[in-house]
Every structure is written in structure tokens, then in C-alpha cells.
Amino acid sequence: MSRNDLYDVIVVGGGPAGLTAGLYLARARYRVLILEKDDFGGQITITNEVVNYPGVGRTTGRELTQTMRQQAQDFGAEFLSAEAIGLDVHGDVKTVHTSRGDLKAFGILIATGASPRKLGFEGESEYAGRGVAYCATCDGEFFTGKEVLVVGGGFAAAEESVFLTTYASKVTVLVREQDFTCDATVAAAAKNNPKIDVRYQVELQGVTAGQGSLREASILNRATGQTETWKPVDGGTFGVFVFAGYVPATDLVRGVVELDDYGYVVTHGYLETSVPGVYAAGDLRAKNLRQVVTATADGAIAAVELERYAKRMSEKTGLIPQRPTSCVYEQSTAKTDAASLADTTPAPAPVKRSTDAAAAANAVRKPGELFSDTTKQQLNVVFNRMSRPVTLALELDDTPLSTELRGFIDAMVALSGGKLKSVVVDGEYEKDDTGRAVFDVEHVLPAARPCVRMVVDGKPTGLAFHGVPSGHEFNSFVLGLYNAAGPGQPLGDDLIERTKSIASPLNIMILVSLTCTMCPETVLASQRLASLNPAVRAEAYDVSHFPELKDQYGAMSVPCIVINRGGEQTVEFGKKSIPQMLDLIGA
């Protein structure tokens, strides 16, 4: 076995626990790989505000974990986007089977976290994405001016109910117990908010809808046993946000390590599992408090023990992984805290629809200011790997948003070293009194402007974004360029074969929000299919600029996936990987 093929530790899961472990192991000069199938950062990335992480006054979940990842990377941790699909934990050298091949290591840290718990009330599955939601940050804006119900009595329910008052006219919190189960200070913020009504010892039994939106809820009073029908005061529609805890993501280790009766990993003194060399950290393990601070503590404790374990196994086997000898952290010059924080942002901030034409014109005059130095470095890596140039075809109208898109694309072209060029596509289109293009919402892929399409060798690739691909969509847009130009992100032969088997025309429309952390993977997965098969078109639409589409499909959650093939239409909600997209379209 080559030392280049061996790691000291493989961390499965890129949330706060996994990122902290990666930081500690890399800083101690051990070779560590952090494996994540979705978006690095974990569940905390969907939390709008974090105020109880020691030493950090106020931040978002996304910003906090971006900083964690940058720290781990600067110390020399390696990262891989892939799904762990199996483990071989016997022997001194263990194997993690992934969607991108097998990986070898002395030790393994399982830090796969947990996913939101579904309650099973009547209508929950039927109206998920059409009124029932699980992420306030992603979907709160859909309920602007409406009433919402929040189900749950823990930290998330208390904190997110306060956040939802930013949008909702009123928030009613349904708590099963006699009081909140979280810290009293956190609960007090919800209890004392004039826009929040808290009801105790009640349970949501079901919801019903009319014309695609929620109209009524059935609420059980657990103390009296009586059931009431609840409606918003204005008699209109409403939303339901479920924050009822999490289900541990332990399918990977079921039958491998010991689990408790609830499916959580059982750990011992220093977070070792029932299998030597396999440790667990974060929300998937049995413990009494699941917060970011306990996840990072878990990561640090497990990392220190794994350092010792890897050292013993290296001495026993005589195998020495290619460990880092220096790191960016040591090589970098001192920076101010503000500059360091700015450099951890991997993408420009979300672009809001500007009503100030002068501000939009300024984006054109100063394109270099759209991207931080770190972002420019990341872009340079992608551009250098692209095997063919890409033409970005712009379809514009007479709105400031089109000017913003033009400036955004011009900035990328200027940084691309000739790998990108842009053209403005002329053509007839109808527009309203504001200069905004009018489009047919019933079309399988509406011609909403502004739009940027990717063209390679003079041929459209089927990849397009309607709006300005910034915020969380920036990374999926850049990877879309890489996939369109080639060689693209590697895929297993089975996934490539399934993708190329799609014979009839397939149109995929993805409705997204630039603040949504779950949308980019769905956009990337859909557009990866389009990059491999000319029969597939995958176009993303920023719903904040094209609300007609939200109304057309009754979308109260993102990502919303609209699939059209052979005259048949399917609407689906939620984050999808490439295998899940292929399953959804039946390939």
C-alpha cells in the first residue's frame, strides 16, 4: 500500500463535529480526510442566528461553519464530496467505501449528525413544500404577512419562532409539554415576543388545504382530550414549521457499532464506539444535549484519541501516511480579524433585486470588488481545470437586475484567463411598463429574463440560471461551468450509464432561493445530468425575482423541482443528490 493511499483518520461528516476533529488532527500533523455527501457545515447551516457559541457574539450557522472549514483547511485537512456507502472496520487498516471509490485509514470518526424528525400528522407528507416546512431560513419568506404554526418545544422551536416573526404576521407555537424544554433564557425570547402566542400541552393532529394552500389545522388539547379546528384570524392561508428534534443518521453504522434503542451510537469514555479505532462525535451519538458547542467538543475529544490510535497503528504496521509538513496557517502572514473573517466567505453575498440603477451600474464599473481574494483563488483552480472554453449567453431585459447579471458575468469573464466569454443574445420579447420581460409561466422552462445559459462548442448545454447566481448558488454555478466544459466532477460508471440511458427529452426546472442551503446540491445534481446527456435540460430560477412561478406550482418551500417529460409533469420538493435525481426521473 502506498503512503499516498493511506490516511491516519477519515472523518465521515462535515458538520461542526467533523470539522473540529479535522482541525485538531491536521494541526497535530496527522493526515485527515473529511468526507461529506451533502453540504459541508451540517444542520447548523440552516440556522439564521447563532448567539450562544462561546467567543462569538452573533453569527449565522453558515458563517460559523465556513470559518471552521477554513481553519481545518488552513491546517492541512483534506476534503472530499462523496457519500460513504459502507465500512470495513476489521484489521489495523480500515476501509470506507464511498460513491467515489474506497478509502483507507487507521481510524474512522463517524460524525454524520441527524436529520429533522417528521411527526406523521395528517397532511404532513402531502403538503410538505406546500405549506409544511422544516427550515425557517430557507422558507420563512414564503409566509410573509401570513400566520404560521411552529410545532415543538425545544431550542430550535423557540429560536426559529422568533426568527419567523421577521416575516409572519403572527406565530403560534404548539408545545406538547407544560413548558419549553430548552434553556429558560431562550424560551423567554419567544414567550415575551408580542407576535408570538405559545400554547402548551397541545398537539398538531393534521392540516387540510384548499386550492393548494393550508387552510385549517386540527389541534388536540392533551389536558382535556378535546380537539379544535384552528384557522388564521384573517381566514387566509398559513404555514406549519416543524422543529421536533432529529433522527440520528446512523444507517451507515447499523450492524457495525452498538446503537441504543433510539438508533443513536453508544460511545464510551473518550467517544470510542464498540469497535476499536471507530469513534463517534456530534448529534448522532447518545447524549443529553445536542448543540454546536457540544458537537465541537466531541470533535476535539475524539480527535485527540484518534491521534493516539493512529500513532499506535502506524508503529505497529510500519505504515506512515503522507502527513502534512507545513500548512497555510503557518505560511500566511498575520491578518486582522476582520480581514480573516472576510476571507472565509466562499461566495459573494446574495444579490437582491435592486431598484437603484446607479447601484447596478456600479457593479459593472467595479467587477473585481464582487469577489474576495479567496474566491478568486478558488475560481482560478476551476478555470485551470476546464478542458474547453464556455460561452455565457445572456438574455437580458431592461431592469436593474439584468444590469447586475451583466456586471456579475463580466467580472467572472475577466478572472477566467480566457476560459469564459460572454455574449448578449438579441431577440424579440414582450416586456411590461417597468422594462421587465413577460414570460409564460405554463411553459415547461419559462423564458424568464435575465438569464445566463452555458454554451460549449457553439451548442447549448442545457444548463441555465434565471436571475443572478450568487449567494449559495454561486458554487453550484461555478461547478456547472466545470461540468459543462469538462472533465467535470467524477461519477461512478453506474451513474454515468443511468444518466446516458435517458433517451426522451427531459426538462427539469428548479425553483431556488439564494439563502437556501439545500438548493445548491439539487441544482448541481440536475445540471450534472444535463452536462452528460443532451436530452436533459436543467434550469434554475430564483423565486425572489420570479414569484409567478412560485404561485404557479404552489411552492412554499425550496428547492422545488418540476420535471416535465413526454407531456407528464412531476413536482417534488427537497434536496436531491445525483442518485436521488435519477431515482426521481426513473432512470
Image (cartoon, rainbow, N blue to C red):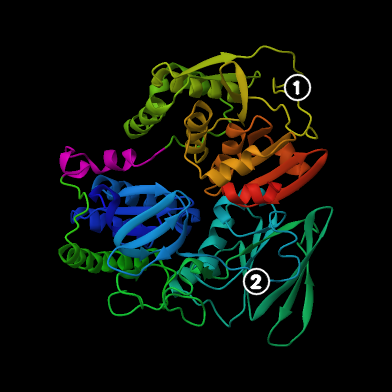
Residue 515: mark in rendering? none
Write down the region rendered in magenta: 326-346
Amino acid under label 2? Leu
Q: Which of marks 2 and 1 is nearer the N terminus?
A: 2
Closer to the camera in the image, 222 or 274: 274
Residue 105 seen:
yes
Which-is-in-front pick, marks 2 and 1? Answer: 2
Does residue 335 show up magenta in the picture? yes
Label 2 CA crowd tier, 10 Å (few <14, some 14–19, many 20+): some
At 64% from the left edge and 47% from the top edge, which residue is drawn?
582
Does residue 556 show up magenta in the picture? no
Determine the secondary structure under disc 2: loop
Going by the image, does 529 lie left or right of 570? Answer: left
Q: In this view, does 283 lie above or below 234?
A: below
Residue 144 seen:
no
At 57% from the left edge and 62% from the top edge, which residue is drawn?
161
Determine the secondary structure under disc 1: loop
Circle 1 residue: 432
Circle 2 residue: 119
Q: Residue 134: x and y, percent?
A: 60, 60
Q: In this view, does 8 lie above or below 459?
A: below
Going by the image, does 436 lie left or right of 489? Answer: right
Closer to the camera in the image, 507 or 230: 507
Q: Residue 280: x and y, percent?
A: 36, 69
Closer to the camera in the image, 405 or 216: 405
At 59% from the left edge and 50% from the top edge, which residue is drawn?
579
Q: Residue 392: x and y, percent?
A: 55, 20
Label 1 CA crowd tier, 10 Å (few <14, some 14–19, many 20+): few
**Where is residue 157, by image quadrant?**
bottom right
